Amino acid sequence: MQLLKDVVGSDTYRINNKYNDAYTPLPVEEIIRRSEFLIGQEVSYDLLGNNCEHFVTLLRYGEGVSEQANRAISAIGFVTAAAGAVSLLGFFQNKSRERHY
């Protein structure tokens, strides 16, 4: 446990509570209790399902949320759908050519 000013030193930082409009922050005492409970424990990491943003929002709001991960998952879904559509078009084009020979 360290004070924020000791961690950041002379670097600039900004506190980001961007989810406050969508989620009600837990009482400070609860956030601290949850944080202290996790000191010294190993926490699994998963870029899309349990990243650092999930971690801090779980502590602050009681729900792990990550806009970053949601954007990445959406992008992956879009690319997958686009690749599927291209493959399907190729399949139909090949079938169409087969009939003309």
Image (cartoon, rainbow, N blue to C red):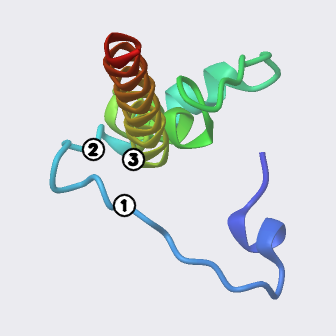
Q: Residue at x 62, y 40 (%)?
A: 52
Rendered image quadrant of residue 74: top left
**Which residue type carries mark 3?**
Glu
Closer to the camera, 28 or 88? 88
Considering only order in the chain, which callout, 1 or 3, is on the residue closer to the N terminus?
A: 1
Q: Earlier in the sequence, mark 1 or mark 2?
A: 1
Q: Are marks 3 and 2 in contact (CB under 8 Å)?
A: no
Query: Which one is nearer the viewer's eye here, 12 or 45?
Result: 45
Q: Secondary structure at mark 2?
A: loop
Q: Residue at x 40, y 12 (%)?
A: 98
Write down the residue under mark 3: 67
Q: Is residue 67 above or below residue 58?
A: below
Cα distance in 3D space between marks 1 and 2: 9 Å
Amino acid found under the numbered disc labelled 1 = Asn
Q: Amino acid at mark 2?
A: Pro
Instruction: Please report whichever mark, 3 or 2, sits nearer to the chain's N-terminal start.
Output: 2
Q: Which residue has dot 1 on it?
A: 17
**Tally of numbered tags:** 3
**Which residue reaches farthest front?**
101
**Mark 3 packing: few (<14 Cα in 10 Å), some, or many (20+)?**
few
Q: Position of residue 57 (x, y in %)?
A: 43, 39
- Neighbour class for label 1 at 10 Å: few (<14), some, many (≥20)? few
Residues tagged 1 and 2 counted as in contact (Cβ below 8 A): yes
Which residue: 41% across, 33% down? 86
Q: Which mark is residue 41?
A: none
Q: To which residue does mark 2 refer?
A: 25
Residue under the image location 78 percent in, 45 percent down: 1
